[in-house]
Image (cartoon, rainbow, N blue to C red):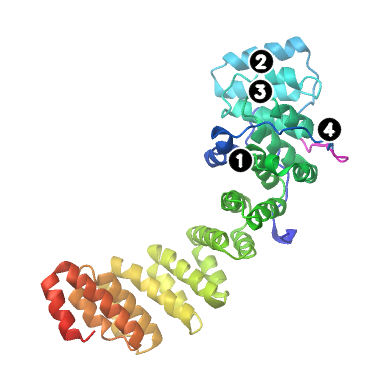
Amino acid sequence: MLQKSFLFGGVITIGIGLIGIWALSDRGDKSGAAGLENGEDETLAGSSNYGGKDRRTVDRALGTGVGKRKMSRNEIIEVGKNLRWELNPLRRRAALGRLLEGMNKENAMLVRDQVVHFSPESNEFQDFHFAWGAMSGVEAVEIGADTKEKDMAATMMGWASLDPVGALSWYDSLEEDRRNCSDVTFGMLKGLASSDLAFATDFAVRKLEAEDQRAGEMLGLVKDKMLEVETLPRAAAWALELPEGKVRNDTLRDVTGEFVKREPKEAANWAAGLDGEEGVEIKKLVAAKWSQEDPAGCLEWAQRLPDGPGKNASIGEVVLEWTGQDPDAVYEFLNGMSDTSERDAAVEAFSSRISGDDPHSAIAWADEIQDSEARRTATIRAGRALMRQNAEEGRQWLQRSGL
């Protein structure tokens, strides 16, 4: 499990009248519910006896507001009518807030009757089931298994957000086919991510190690939450700690891209401290993105990097982007460089960038590259561009080139 020292931990709270739930994003709806829409059964095929000794009650729920006042049956029904027919969204949220204030374990099903007619994607439907899951835990989840509406994801999320340890223990006790239910799995993940991102990461990584095809999407959801609530350096450190592989690489690229977008100088300083092949790739990504907005500033950073592949690759990425913005300035920059591996990288990038419009110049620039393998690669690239532009002229050049 990842260390919690640099990870966000907190509990989502349900405000009276206006309840924001991250799990109800479009991405979550598509991923969490997709399995059931494709024929998966929402029923958990039996019920677990897990109750959770530390099941938190509403009174200890850190200010959710659920159950803070008593409401009679008639009052619940009356408020439910107002909720059903109210067109003003603010008044509708206020009515839902009143229902949640009056909800307890005994009247939860009656309160549910007041919202069940809403679309499963609506805030009213989702917020109620989130609150119910947070209040009643496994009881609400298992009742949801027997209902026809698509309420499992929100109910599971509510429970996991308030009682992550209990919800995880219950989830792990399920048989494999029941753990594969998408609504339960994604509801669990989103609830954990609303409570403790270390728990959520560990949950998603377990799925990744088990070769669950949904693991990449799960870590993507955790990544989005990480970028929402954490500092960018901590989000980057989190991505670096993920297990090696494609999912980690994709996640790291996404986090790095967002880091550069928001705080380019800080991202560049972070990338400068990374070693090895991964450090080279991250530096290239930083240079490619930062140079779109500030090629001069990015070039200054790249030139200060320690000599080596990371520096050369970064300078090359800056030149690629800068050439599209101001080729004359790049021309002057290249002519002012001494013959080094840095210049080779810059010239190769410049030749590549102009080859589509001016293959003759691209070939001439490629010939200035000192490294024989890099020179050959750049020359072939420019020659192919010439052939696409003029096949006959390209063939004549190829015969003269000795390639």
Name the amino acid, label 1: Trp
Residue 45 place in picture, x, y as percent: 72, 33
Using the rendered view, name the quadrant where residue 25 is placed.
Answer: top right
Residue 143 place in picture, x, y as percent: 74, 27
Q: For marks 1 and 4, give the one nearer the viewer.
A: 1
* Residue placed under numbered mark 2 in the picture: 80
Q: Which mark is residue 328?
A: none
**Cα–Cα span, label 3 and label 2:** 8 Å
Whether residue 137 is visible: no
Asked whether, in this view, residue 325 is left or right of residue 58, the answer is left
Q: Which mark is residue 96?
A: 3
Name the amino acid, label 4: Asp
Figure check: 197 above or below 314: above
The residue sitting at 47% across, 67% down in the picture is 286
Q: Earlier in the sequence, mark 1 or mark 3?
A: 1
**Cα–Cα span, label 3 and label 4:** 19 Å
Name the amino acid, label 2: Gly
Magenta highlight on residue 58? yes
* Residue placed under numbered mark 1 in the picture: 22
Q: Earlier in the sequence, mark 1 or mark 4?
A: 1
* Residue placed under numbered mark 4 in the picture: 59
Q: Earlier in the sequence, mark 2 or mark 1?
A: 1
Q: Quadrant of the C terminus?
A: bottom left
In this view, which residue lies farthest toward the right?
53
Within 10 Å of disc 3 (Cα), the crowding (few <14, some 14-19, many 20+) is many
Using the rendered view, name the quadrant where residue 160 is placed.
Answer: top right
